[in-house]
Amino acid sequence: EPEVTQTPSHQVTQMGQEVILRCVPISNHLYFYWYRQILGQKVEFLVSFYNNEISEKSEIFDDQFSVERPDGSNFTLKIRSTKLEDSAMYFCASSETTGGSQWPQHFGDGTRLSIL
Amino acid sequence: AQSVAQPEDQVNVAEGNPLTVKCTYSVSGNPYLFWYVQYPNRGLQFLLKYITGDNLVKGSYGFEAEFNKSQTSFHLKKPSALVSDSALYFCAVRDMNTGFQKLVFGTGTRLLVSP
């Protein structure tokens, strides 16, 4: 079964540094998402992306965050200047879109981001 | 705004017994409802969804869920639990009347199935 893949599985970064998290969505999917899960807390929506633009973003997704689809397969999340509170598990997800928003989102295994 | 409540942090059940994991939701319009399971160090794995139609939906690994509009609930059930079902379960909702795709998740319920 096709899977969403995320790299790296664990990223350790100094506070203030830029970090890029990478995702390869399922190949025929057209909607892409990033979520995060701070340790012990619920999964929170960050951003959705469709047709090469952001379709929705949460209040968490401020100017320090950006997303990009640099080629036909990768989908990236960049944090420009990391803060301690950015430490979390970041999940990428993708879904089909054939006129219905009822398609489930399929999640990768996540990248654990640790800010020192 | 959408919200999901999972009132139990943990559910304990003996193998072979039926299990129920509770979920209630709040949306302004009609809901799309989902259950996901998370095993240690893994992502969220889709189990089942309710979009429309029959209130009882069947999903992967023998799980099912019952949609109850009057009680705004979407409880996850399985007739006979397995030790391998032990994991973290998340209920999620999106409002089908909005144009947005985001899922709003509950806080999760840890299911422990004892041998």
Image (tube, coloured by chain):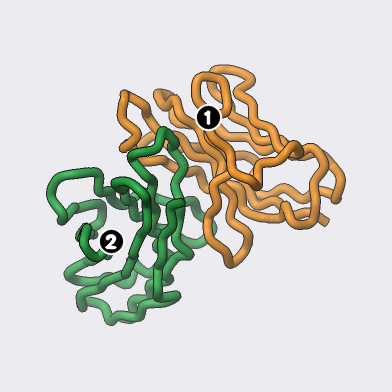
Chain colours: A orange, B green
Pointer 2: what residue?
A: B72
Residue B99: % across, % down? 41, 33
Give whichever of B60, A64 is nearer the camera: A64
Report the chain holding disc 2: B
Quick check: can you spot residue A80?
yes
Residue A4: % across, % down? 48, 37
Residue furthest left as drawn? B54
Q: Amino acid at mark 1?
A: Ser
Give whichever of A39, B86 is nearer the camera: A39
User: Is there CB contact under 8 Å for labels 2 and 1?
Assistant: no
Q: Amino acid at mark 2?
A: Thr
Q: Residues within 10 Å of mark 1 (few under 14, many from 20)?
A: some
Residue A27: % across, % down? 44, 25
Give whichever of A85, B1 is nearer the camera: B1
Q: Which mark is residue A8?
A: none
Residue A70: % across, % down? 64, 20
Q: Secondary structure at mark 1?
A: strand
Residue furthest front as drawn? B28
- The answer to whether residue B78 is left or right of residue B12 is left
Asked which quadrant contains residue A64, the reply is: top right
Tell me: residue B22, above or below residue A88. Answer: below
Q: Secondary structure at mark 2?
A: loop
Q: Quadrant of the C terminus of chain B?
A: bottom left
Pointer 1: what residue?
A: A55
Tell me: residue A31, above or below residue A6. Answer: above
